Amino acid sequence: MVGGWLTSAALPNDKIYHSVSYDSGHTWSSPALAFQIDGIAVNDPSVLRLRNPQGGYRYLMYFTYSNYNTLDQKNLTGLATSNDATTWTNQGLVIGYDNLLDNNGAWAPSAVAADPTGSTIYLYYFPDARPAPNDGAVYRSTMTDGGRMLSKTIEVVPPDGHPRLNVDVSIDPRGGFRLRRACAPAPPHTPQPMVRLNHAAWHAEGQGFESP
């Protein structure tokens, strides 16, 4: 899944597209439109495949929601759901202006499920707290009620004054999690050194790591 535009005809609002691979990622189908909201820019999709207690799977997609018609133009986070990862239903905003730490919204989400059914989901993102020195902070929100309910937010990476793009959190095979941020304007959005998670304690790559 990727957000953006295929051609200039799709401007001004971002849409989300998907491609499919049947050979372990060696080749991919042409991008096809997967999700859009009229008059709203949607981008930065983060998709989870979760087990249904009744059998099969369900899919959650968190995404950046941007309404450029508003005066403040803050980025927020929305949720869409699917039973087949192809047809998506918009479930609306899950993090608005109030993210439980401040009123700076949430953008570029990256979701990690605490268990196979997604009873608890950790959502990592940037608050829209620009300009510097507030850039670069990463928040983690705990989502419950099937991933729809915002219940708690903490700061896991403090601001460093540098514009960032695209939080990406993944499971570390040694235990815990990995997080990386891309830095702008260094071309082409150079990924910053990986940091790792021990519960909510993040460390720069090379500064030590413990399994949770």
Image: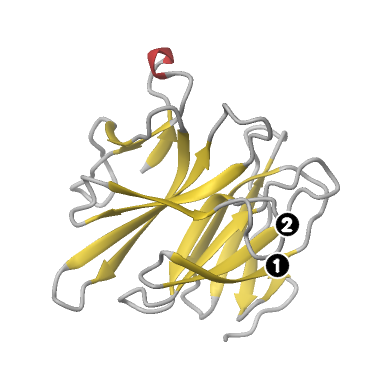
Numbered mark located on residue 137 in the image: 2
Residue 120 visible in the current orientation:
yes
- The answer to whether the residue labelled 2 contacts the one labelled 1, judged by CB atoms less than 8 Å apart, is yes
Going by the image, does 77 lie left or right of 125? Answer: left
Q: Position of residue 32 (x, y in %)?
A: 26, 32
Residue beneath the point at 83% across and 48% down: 161
Q: Position of residue 50 (x, y in %)?
A: 29, 68
In the image shown, does 175 or 4 lie closer to the viewer?
4
Callout 2: 10 Å neighbours few (<14), some, many (20+)?
Answer: many
SS class, disc 1: strand
In the image shown, does 25 or 100 lie closer to the viewer?
100
In the image shown, does 136 or 69 lie closer to the viewer?
69
> Which callout, 2 or 1, points at the residue further toward the start of the chain?
2
Whether residue 20 is situated above or below residue 120 in the rendered picture: above
Label 1 sits on residue: 155
Residue beneath the point at 68% across and 35% down: 72
Callout 1: 10 Å neighbours few (<14), some, many (20+)?
Answer: some
Q: Amino acid at mark 1?
A: Glu
Residue beneath the point at 29% across and 32% down: 31
